[in-house]
Amino acid sequence: MRTRGFVTGVSAVFAVAALLLFGALAGYGTREGARGGPGVDPARAERLAEAARSIRALGVNALPLLDTYIDSDPENAFGYYLLAAAHARQGGWAAVMQALRAGNRAPRCQHYVPRESPAAGAWEAIAPLMALRQDILDAARMLPGQEAGALLFECRRMAERVAGAEPASLALLEAGTRMRRDFSHATVLLAQRAGEGWRADQARAEEKADQARLARIAEVRERLRADAESGNAEAVPGGEAERAAVARLLAAEASSSAAPGTAAAGRQVADGAHR
């Protein structure tokens, strides 16, 4: 059962920051992505964007709209993650946990994009999740250790799913990786306070792996930007070349056992959050 509650609007400062940050994450050019590609569903894309916008724009009306969105797409993790972001605005951590767990159990994590501009739709769904990231990081410094550890565990799982959401995109991969890196760093601090050096070391290793991934993402984005500027129609944001580049990056990580969150150490960090 989803929990309802009063949700305050996101501050104007965050709104401006989100526009600047996620405009950059969502695209590296102005051309449209490939039409009719994976995840292109204008109607669902608009409902997803409306649900995301509601968190900062509608205040008390956000939760009913989010519930309606989830009811329309109950197997998609994205709606539950947006619900968690809404609850986090009011500090309702029990409701946040409930929403995160529901999202992490959902069969798929699907991001829908409008046909006319696949890249432009990405940041609207990402922005509330990055706000959730900051709310969680703030809460982890104040909550009791066990509660903070469990919350960070669920958030790391969320970040992994966002990074691997379909259709694959650099915007989602980067946002999810940034979130997971920061949640790993928070786990380091939490473990240090608890005197759990082994867990701090493992979380630190995952943080380092995610930072390395972010460097590789930047390299891929720069190559695609250059290709797009040279006239390669498939290299535009949201296009086939971007999806293929993401697949190659993740495949290379998997083949070298460098993919964050997949190593045995990663599983031990997750397990340790519940001890």
Image (spheres, rainbow, N blue to C red):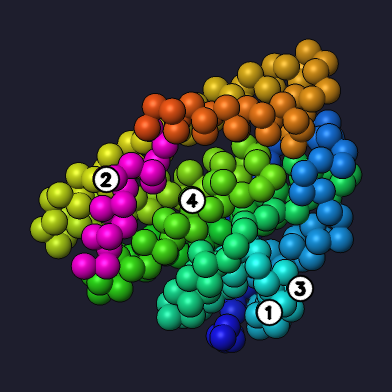
Which image quarter is the C terminus in?
A: bottom left
Q: Earlier in the sequence, mark 1 or mark 2?
A: 1
Task: For marks 2 and 4, give the one nearer the viewer.
Answer: 2
Q: Quadrant of residue 138?
A: bottom left
| Residue type pointed to by label 1 | Asp
Q: Are marks 4 and 1 in contact (CB under 8 Å)?
A: no
Q: Are marks 2 and 4 in contact (CB under 8 Å)?
A: no
- Distance from disc 1 to disc 2, alpha carbons, whole Å, reads 36 Å
Region rendered in magenta = 258-275
* Mark 1, residue position: 67
Foreground pick, 216 / 50: 216
* Label number found at residue 160: 4
Q: Are marks 4 and 3 in contact (CB under 8 Å)?
A: no
* Mark 2, residue position: 265
Task: In the rendered view, tell whether residue 93 sits above or below residue 256.
Answer: below
Q: Are marks 3 and 2 in contact (CB under 8 Å)?
A: no
| Residue type pointed to by label 3 | Ser
Q: Earlier in the sequence, mark 3 or mark 2?
A: 3
Task: In the rendered view, tell whether residue 160 sits above or below residue 208.
Answer: below
- Distance from disc 3 to disc 2, alpha carbons, whole Å, reads 38 Å
| Residue type pointed to by label 4 | Glu
